[in-house]
Amino acid sequence: MNTNLFYGTRSSVVEVVDIEREIASWLRHYRQYVVAFRSDDYLPAVKLGLSAYLRGQSFDGCVDELEQSYLRVRGNSRLDWYEALPVARAAWTRLTEQQTGRAASAQSQYGLSTAA
């Protein structure tokens, strides 16, 4: 069993996210965001975006909280908050889009419709 699975509660359905897989994806693709930085510079921002998603928070609704958290957890990251913000948002958005795609796929596969 993967011990790095995290369970979020974005709705009445519990969602499982493989954090290691998400971080591995970011490590493969991080340079497209800000070329001058190392992958270690991105990790605190990525983890904050993933955490906000798993807590079921709207990204825009928690930006101030995320900024305070980033200032506490950034460690040796060379990204300031304004450079970290789009990275955190992209991590949150990636999971949101994956969830939306899974929901649409399930609706299509099982003939479900959200139309009234």
Image (cartoon, rainbow, N blue to C red):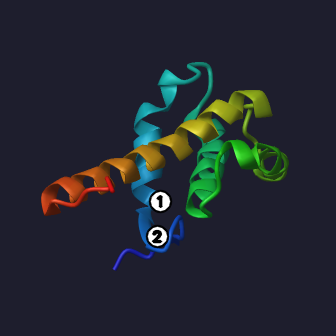
Q: Quadrant of the N terminus?
A: bottom left
In the image: residue 96, left or right of residue 105? right
Mark 1 secondary-structure assignment: helix
In the rendered image, residue 105, in percent from the top left (x then y), is placed at 22, 52
Residue lying at the far bottom in this picture: please name it: 1
Q: Is residue 74 visible?
A: no
Which residue is painted at 64% across and 55% down in the image?
A: 52
Mark 2 secondary-structure assignment: loop
Q: State which quadrant residue 36 falls in.
A: top right
Q: Which residue is mark 1?
A: 19
Which residue is painted at 50% across and 32% down in the image?
A: 30
What type is the residue that disc 1 sits on? Ile
Residue lying at the far front in this picture: please name it: 116
In the rendered image, residue 108, in percent from the top left (x then y), is placed at 18, 53
Which residue is painted at 60% across and 61% down in the image?
A: 56
Q: Is residue 53 visible?
A: yes
Q: Are marks 2 and 1 in contact (CB under 8 Å)?
A: yes
In the image: residue 27, left or right of residue 89? left
Q: Quadrant of the C terminus?
A: bottom left
Which residue is painted at 59% across and 31% down in the image?
A: 38
In the rendered image, residue 15, in percent from the top left (x then y), is placed at 43, 68
In the rendered image, residue 60, in percent from the top left (x then y), is placed at 70, 42
> Within 10 Å of the Cα at label 2, are there few (<14), some (14-19), or many (20+) other Cα atoms?
few
What type is the residue that disc 2 sits on? Asn
**Mark 2 and mark 1: Cα distance apart in space:** 6 Å
Q: Relative to 108, is 11 above or below? A: below
In primary-sequence order, the first of circles 2 and 1 is: 2
In the image: residue 88, left or right of residue 7? right
Q: Relative to 98, is 1 above or below? A: below
> Within 10 Å of the Cα at label 1, are there few (<14), some (14-19), or many (20+) other Cα atoms?
some
Q: Which residue is mark 2?
A: 4
